[in-house]
Amino acid sequence: MAMRFDGQVAIVTGAGGGLGREHALALAARGAKVVVNDLGGARDGSGGSATAAESVVAEIVAAGGEAIANAASVTDFAAVQAMVDQAMAKWGRIDILVNNAGVLRDKTFAKMEIKDFRFVVDVHLMGAVNCTKAVWEIMRGQNYGRIVMTTSSSGLYGNFGQSNY
């Protein structure tokens, strides 16, 4: 029996490429409507554009799915709340949140500035908190919801130059 998500709505952060893109495509292929969130910046979090998210949305739509793009920064609670409001206005529910957004500031602890350390923590930790907080009451009100957190092996086992993980 195949796992299906028909009628469910998913938000996937950091979904413009890599693992987030794969999450978004897999959920859509199984029937979920997907908010493809990606700031569209470089791996270090600089820059920004909705192009990456729009590209994944185009793939989902071309395959017969339904999706919308969103370029909110997960570090900005107001922008995250607006993304959640956008999904609720379009589809009336949120069933799945995949907290996947991440950035890389690859320097040793000795060479890393506090602002770079803080930025990674803001995206990885507080970004997940912001997104989870924004959907929490919706999921409670539905008596249903699933929240998935992704991490890298650097977060689990450590890696040279990534003390901020």
Image (cartoon, rainbow, N blue to C red):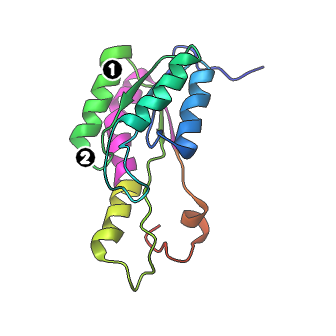
**Could you tell me which secondary element the residue under label 1 belongs to?**
helix
Side (left or right) of 115 relative to 143: left
**Could you tell me which secondary element the residue under label 2 belongs to?**
loop
Where residue 134 sits in the image (x, y, percent)?
31, 36
Quadrant of residue 142 in the image?
top left
Quadrant of residue 30 in the image?
top right
Where residue 122 sits in the image (x, y, percent)?
33, 58
Mark sitting earlier along the chain (2/1):
2
How crowded pointer 2 is (Cα within 10 Å; few <14, some 14-19, many 20+) is rated as: some
Where residue 105 sits in the image (x, y, percent)?
41, 67
Residue at left 48%, top 46%?
A: 100
Q: Nearer the viewer, residue 165 or 60?
A: 60
**Given contact means CB atoms under 8 Å apart, are the residues at marks 2 and 1 in contact?**
no
Q: Please say if 17 is above or below 135.
A: below
Quarter of the N terminus within the rendering: top right
Residue at left 59%, top 37%?
A: 22
Looking at the rendering, the stretch of residues picked out in magenta corresponds to 126-148
Q: Which residue is mark 1?
A: 88
Kind of residue sitting beneath label 2: Asp
Residue at left 57%, top 44%?
A: 19
As measured in the structure, the alpha-carbon distance from the residue carrying label 2 to the one carrying label 1 is: 19 Å
Q: Which residue is mark 2?
A: 76
Q: Please say if 101 is above or below 117.
A: above
* Residue 163 visible in the shown view: yes
Residue 138 inside the magenta-drawn segment:
yes
Question: Furthest residue to the right?
Answer: 1
* Residue 10 visible in the shown view: no
Side (left or right) of 94 relative to 28: left
How crowded pointer 1 is (Cα within 10 Å; few <14, some 14-19, many 20+) is rated as: some
Side (left or right) of 81 relative to 91: left
Where residue 113 sits in the image (x, y, percent)?
31, 77
